[in-house]
Amino acid sequence: MARRKKVYEGKAKILYEGPEPGTLVQYFKDDATAFNAEKRATIEGKGVLNNRLSEFFMTGLNAIGVPTHFIRRINMREQLIRAVEIIPLEVVVRNVAAGSISKRLGIEEGTPLPRPIVEFYFKNDELGDPLVAEEHILAFGWAAQQDLDDMVSLALRVNDFLSGLFLGVGIRLVDFKIEIGRIWDGDYMRLIVADEISPDSCRLWDIETGKKLDKDVFRRDLGNLADAYTEVARRLGVMPQGPTGVTKPTLIN
Ligand code: TMP
């Protein structure tokens, strides 16, 4: 049997060659890392949950006209995606102060921000993904001014969509990270949302209790990560039976 070709392996996902040109298969691993992979663990079921949750968010975005790389889910851990040229920037949108902005600027975690703030980080593990200004992005040619404007507008549309979705199930979208890629339609280039959208790359707090339902549970040792992600999925109506798919036996009369 022919073995499929691995194109790239990251910390949480593997990309394989897809069935047609311009496509890839994205496989979600159970591995969790934090602080640039200084802290690692394998969390059973995480890959399955993130595959389903990323499918859910990207399908919703596609439906409202925000283009994403998502084509269709293949199985519990894999999805078919469009191959893109990833822009080497992590685009972070923040609604409430938490994490690095709280540390950097001395703003107490949980302080609502006056408006959503969009930040860019240079994707480079050796440098620890440093915060960069538009000036750096333009000067080093990572993206052009038009790309930057499009990236901000995409990021804010994703923020509006996700904030509303989470608000409806009692969750505050504190912040999130997306990655954006280029695709070519003949001579025309378009930017689309790529990578993944999942609790690995968002901060999600229960509106009533403030309970964290995202990767901070792992980063800060606050409990069971798979339980937190299962809770997010359950509230959104995604895999109500949980990641193992095991349901209790029921009596048939
Ligand atoms: P930060 O507060 O640590 O800068 O994180 C901002 C958001 O970006 C948060 O939702 C977590 C997400 N994030 C990633 O997805 N990957 C990363 O490598 C980092 C540092 C943050």
Image (cartoon, rainbow, N blue to C red):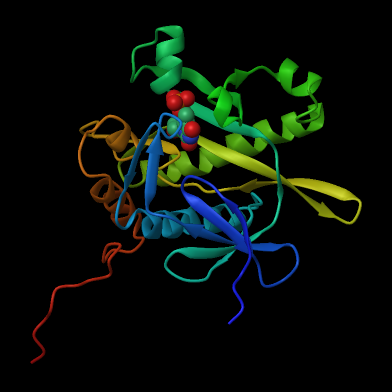
Q: Is 61 rendered above or below residue 36?
A: below
Quadrant in the picture for residue 210: top left
Residue 42 is situated, as x and y percent measured from the top left of the image, at 32, 49
- Horizontal relation, residue 56 to residue 84: left or right: left
- Horizontal relation, residue 53 to residue 81: left or right: left
- Residue name at image x 26 percent, y 46 percent: 228
Find the residue positioned furthest to the bottom.
Answer: 253
Q: How many marks?
A: 0
Q: Quadrant where the N terminus lies?
A: bottom right
- Residue name at image x 52 percent, y 48 percent: 196
Q: Which residue is nearer to you in this view: 123 or 249?
A: 123
Residue 229 is situated, as x and y percent measured from the top left of the image, at 31, 49
Q: Is 28 rendered above or below residue 144?
A: below
- Horizontal relation, residue 237 to residue 211: left or right: right
Q: Which residue is nearer to you in this view: 137 or 176?
A: 137
Q: Can residue 206 be seen in this view?
A: no
Find the residue positioned furthest to the top.
Answer: 106
Q: Quadrant where the C terminus lies?
A: bottom left
Q: Can residue 73 be seen in this view?
A: yes
Q: Which residue is nearer to you in this view: 235 or 147?
A: 147
Find the residue positioned furthest to the right.
Answer: 187
Q: Which residue is nearer to you in this view: 46 or 157?
A: 46
Residue 153 is situated, as x and y percent measured from the top left of the image, at 67, 34
